[in-house]
């Protein structure tokens, strides 16, 4: 299950590549590392900070609250929070990891 979760999360993020990562690796299709809001488009910016995604982020965290997943996220530092949101946690039961994937899949399709 863990391997499946990780692969699915990677596919999701590959469907929505973050410009700063592509730019740093010299992808020619990316002319700059910036988000539409003008700030560098990093994972933490995209998932936690971009002002253009406030409503989508509220929907994401509302979904986390319905499964009490927000309790696991709220005290994590930014790096661990991104890791948890993208890849889940092998200590969670499968239904919670699946719920997390469902919520993040919806969010990254913004
Ligand atoms: Zn932005």
Image (tube, grey):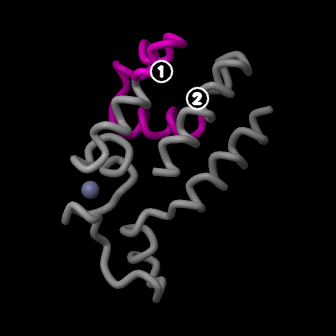
Q: Position of residue 3 (x, y in %)?
A: 77, 41
Query: From this viewpoint, which residue is outermost toward the bottom?
Result: 28
In the rendered image of this protein, does residue 86 appear above or below residue 72? Answer: below
Which region shows up in magenta? Answer: 62-88
* Rendered image: mark on residue 64: 1
Position of the N terminus by quadrant? top right
Residue at the location (31% across, 79% down)? 32
Residue at the location (58% across, 42% down)? 105
Q: Position of residue 82 (x, y in %)?
A: 44, 39
Element type at mark 1 = helix
Q: Is residue 41 left or right of residue 81?
A: left
Query: Ligand 1 lies in which image quarter?
Result: bottom left
In the rendered image of this protein, does residue 109 appear above or below residue 34? Answer: above
Element type at mark 2 = helix
- Of residues 63 and 34, the one nearer the viewer is 63
Quadrant housing residue 95: top right
Q: Are marks 2 and 1 in contact (CB under 8 Å)?
A: yes
> Residue 85 colored magenta?
yes
Q: Is residue 18 left or right of residue 8?
A: left
Cβ at disc 1 under 8 Å from ligand 1: no
Q: Which residue is mark 2?
A: 100
Q: Position of residue 6 (x, y in %)?
A: 68, 43
Residue at the location (73% across, 21% down)? 94
């Amino acid at each position: 299950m863990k391997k499946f979760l990780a692969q699915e999360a990677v596919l999701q993020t590959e469907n929505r590549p973050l410009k700063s990562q592509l730019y740093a690796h010299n992808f020619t299709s990316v002319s700059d590392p910036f988000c539409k809001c003008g700030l560098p488009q990093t994972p933490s910016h995209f998932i936690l900070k971009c002002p253009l995604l406030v409503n989508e982020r509220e929907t994401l965290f509302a979904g986390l609250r319905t499964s009490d997943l927000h309790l696991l996220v709220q005290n994590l530092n930014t790096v661990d929070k991104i890791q948890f949101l993208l890849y889940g946690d092998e200590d969670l039961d499968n239904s919670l990891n699946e719920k997390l994937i469902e919520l993040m899949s919806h969010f990254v399709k913004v």
